[in-house]
Image (spheres, rainbow, N blue to C red):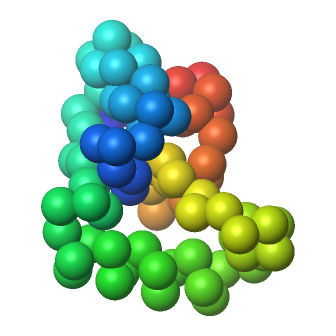
Amino acid sequence: MKVTVIGSHLCPDTLYALNRLSAAKAEIDFKNLSASLADLKAYLALRESSPAYADIRENGGIGIPCFVLEDGTQTRDLEKVLG
């Protein structure tokens, strides 16, 4: 399984997800928003334009971690990724 994880090394939920995915032997491409302005800019464009983030925007959240599967599916549900 290959998955892109969009998050931050400062976020406990992101760290938890990375550990779970690593234990599941997933091939991980980590986009660390705290370390890359280019990755942050790309994520913000996704977050601001996607209806899937409406609740996050309304509640002032960040919406990480976010997962992008090999087929392009985007989700914030770690269990869906692992399943």
- Number of labelled discs? 0
Residue occupying the point 81% across, 74% down: 58
The reply to whether residue 60 is in sight is yes
Eyeballing the image, is 49 above or below 19? Answer: below
Q: Residue at x 34, y 83 (%)?
A: 41
The image quadrant that residue 53 belongs to is: bottom right
Quadrant of image for the C terminus: top right
Q: Going 60% across and 85% down the picture, which residue do you hit?
A: 48
| Residue 70 seen in the current view | no
**Position of residue 60 measured from the top left corner of the image (x, y, whole percent):** 71, 69
Residue 18: x %, y % from top left: 35, 29
Q: Give percent across and percent down for residue 4.
A: 34, 50
- Position of residue 16 relative to residue 35, above or below, is above
Q: Split into 4 quadrants, where in the image is the N terminus?
A: top left
Left or right: residue 20 versus residue 54 is: left
Question: Going 66% across and 80% down the picture, which residue do you hit?
Answer: 50
